[in-house]
């Protein structure tokens, strides 16, 4: 395997962020997050159902984009589905069955951090499924997604595209940083040697599942901050939301505290030590 040139990820992003303008990024992210809240209110009010799929290579920045989307939203309305390795029972089920239970009810948004497309990518490349299972997935997937759309679900599919060089730099960064090391799984490490295999799998997946009713949208993710803004802005454009007018909240003066209440002594309570005084 050709040895990749080591890149200082912090310096790389500092330079690119300067081109983007970090103040603009924070300001625009805040504006988009306000729009996300408006979209959430519309979904809740109209009982709409939204599914957003996030796929892409390891370290492409899917998690960071999902985090910025969910950050201002109500977790009772917007939730993330990040399924782990299927159990023996789930392996015996119809492939799409375990994903169906995570689909939204009316008034909900579900973000899939990887989805049923695991079969078209990881499972295919790593040999976790048979050729028959792989072929059957592509036979069923378009019809499955058509049924979702016909049922009224707004289905949006994103592929986060990252270059070989940037992915390697992010892997190196995760390996060095103890806070990020958990993000680097044995599967991620093995994928470094299978770049072309994943590329072929992705190309084949697009050729069979990029439909008019459920198209793929590619996010250029080499610069994570730019990818987040582009993804959120595009997602908002694909959901026909309107601002739901709400009555302003007026806080009346607080009522007087009851005079017969006696607070228990502080000495009988267990307090967390003030380490940072």
Image: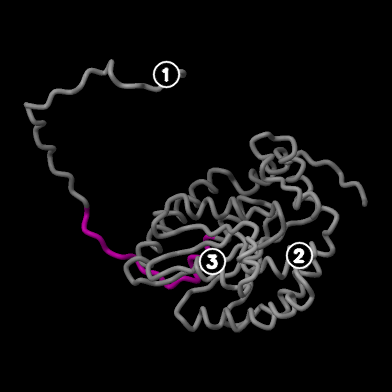
Residue 263: where, in percent of width, then height?
18, 23
Mark linked to residue 52? 3
The local crowd at label 1, few if under 14, some if 14 to 19, many if 20 or more residues have their Cα within 10 Å, is few
Mark 2 or mark 1: whose residue is earlier in sequence: 2
Asked which secondary structure carries label 3, the reply is strand
Q: Viewer-proximal residue, 103 or 87?
A: 87
Asked which secondary structure carries label 1, the reply is loop
Question: In the picture, which quadrant includes the C terminus?
Answer: top left
Q: Residue furthest left?
A: 259
Range shown magenta: 232-248
Residue occupied by mark 1: 273
The residue sitting at 39% across, 57% down in the picture is 76
Residue 37: where, in percent of width, then height?
39, 57
Question: What distance separates the C-alpha of mark 1 from that of mark 3?
Answer: 43 Å
Residue occupied by mark 2: 128
Given contact means CB atoms under 8 Å apart, are the residues at marks 1 and 3 in contact? Answer: no
Asked which secondary structure carries label 2, the reply is loop
Q: Tell me if residue 117 comes above or below residue 143 in the rendering.
A: above
Question: What distance separates the C-alpha of mark 2 from that of mark 1?
Answer: 50 Å
Classified by dominant secondary structure, the portion drawn in magenta counts as: loop
Mark 3 or mark 2: whose residue is earlier in sequence: 3
Residue 208: where, in percent of width, then height?
71, 80
Mark 1 or mark 3: whose residue is earlier in sequence: 3
The residue sitting at 77% across, 56% down in the picture is 163
In this rendering, the label closer to the viewer, 2 or 1: 2
């Amino acid at each position: 395997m050709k040895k990749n040139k080591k890149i200082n990820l912090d310096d790389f992003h500092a330079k690119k962020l300067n081109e983007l303008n970090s103040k603009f990024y924070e300001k625009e992210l805040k504006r988009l997050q306000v729009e996300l809240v408006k979209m959430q209110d519309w979904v809740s009010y109209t009982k709409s159902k939204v599914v957003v799929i996030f796929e892409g290579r390891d370290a492409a920045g899917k998690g960071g984009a999902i985090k910025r989307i969910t950050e201002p939203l109500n977790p009772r309305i917007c939730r993330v589905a990040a399924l782990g390795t299927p159990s023996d029972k789930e392996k015996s089920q119809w492939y799409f069955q375990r994903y169906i239970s995570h689909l939204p009810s009316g008034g909900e948004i579900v973000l899939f951090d990887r989805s049923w497309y695991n079969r078209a990518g990881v499972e295919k490349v790593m040999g976790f499924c048979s050729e028959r299972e792989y072929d059957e997935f592509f036979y069923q997937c378009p019809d499955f997604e058509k049924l979702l759309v016909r049922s009224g679900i707004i289905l949006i599919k994103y592929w986060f595209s990252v270059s070989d060089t940037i992915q390697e730099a992010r892997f190196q960064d995760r390996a060095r940083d103890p806070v990020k090391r958990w993000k680097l799984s044995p599967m991620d490490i093995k994928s470094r040697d299978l770049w072309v295999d994943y590329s072929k799998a992705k190309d084949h997946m697009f050729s069979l599942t990029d439909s008019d009713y459920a198209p793929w949208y590619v996010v250029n993710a080499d610069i994570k901050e730019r990818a987040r803004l582009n993804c959120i802005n595009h997602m908002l454009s694909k959901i026909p939301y309107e601002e739901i007018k709400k009555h302003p909240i007026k806080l009346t003066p607080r009522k007087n505290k009851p005079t017969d209440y006696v607070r228990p002594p502080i000495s009988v309570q267990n307090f967390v030590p003030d380490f940072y005084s």
